[in-house]
């Protein structure tokens, strides 16, 4: 798949709420996922498809997702960006909040090899 095909496919799947299908299909086995903020005692980086998928599953399990939107992709030079907006409630605290993030994906060899998340403050 070309970069635009990968970018459009990821957005298509995310808009259909099939994020885990997108990860299975489009991520390289050695993907690196980089969070803007490390969890207490944790790392910014998560390495490998199973670990990255588990990180996302853990986040989804910890939040009630009321709604979400996906905007993009924005493509350039081996990378693409996507804007995600979510309305969620953190299950542990009951706090409802709006989240906005930009995800920047790097593509090599027909797969997503890196994702990096930038958050609205």
Image (tube, rainbow, N blue to C red):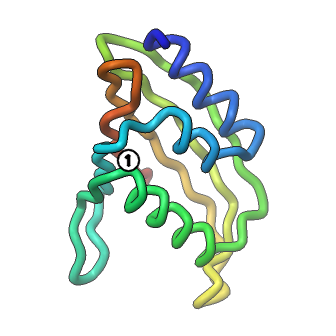
> Which residue is labeled 1 in the image?
117
- Front one among 64 and 23: 23
x then y, percent, for residue 7: 52, 22
The residue shown at (32%, 28%) is 106
Q: At numbered mark 1, what does the secondary structure look like: helix, strand or loop? A: strand
The residue shown at (32%, 56%) is 35
- Front one among 96 and 57: 57
x then y, percent, for residue 28: 37, 37
Residue 85, above or below 27: below
Q: Where does the C terminus fall, quadrant-wise?
A: bottom left
- Few, some or many residues within 10 Å of mark 1 (<14, 14–19, 20+): some
Residue 87, above or below 33: below
Left or right: 40, with 73 as reference point: left
Give the mark count.
Answer: 1
Left or right: 110, with 88 as reference point: left
The residue shown at (45%, 40%) is 102
Report which quarter residue 94 is drawn in: bottom right
Report which quarter residue 66 is drawn in: bottom right
x then y, percent, for residue 89: 67, 75
Residue 3, above or below 73: above
Report which quarter residue 37 is drawn in: bottom left
Left or right: 64, with 19 as reference point: right
x then y, percent, for residue 116: 33, 43
Residue 70, above or below 78: below
The residue shown at (63%, 43%) is 21
């Amino acid at each position: 798949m070309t970069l635009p095909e990968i970018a459009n496919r990821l957005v298509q799947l995310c808009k259909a709420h099939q994020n885990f299908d997108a990860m299975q299909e489009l991520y390289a086995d050695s993907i690196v996922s980089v969070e803007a903020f490390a969890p207490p005692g944790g790392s910014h980086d998560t390495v490998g498809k199973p670990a990255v998928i588990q990180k996302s599953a853990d986040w989804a399990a910890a939040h009630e997702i009321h709604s979400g939107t996906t905007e993009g992709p924005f493509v350039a030079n081996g990378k693409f960006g996507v804007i995600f907006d979510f309305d969620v409630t953190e299950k542990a605290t009951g706090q409802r909040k709006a989240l906005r993030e930009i995800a920047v994906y790097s593509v090599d060899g027909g797969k997503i090899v890196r994702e990096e998340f930038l958050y609205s403050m």
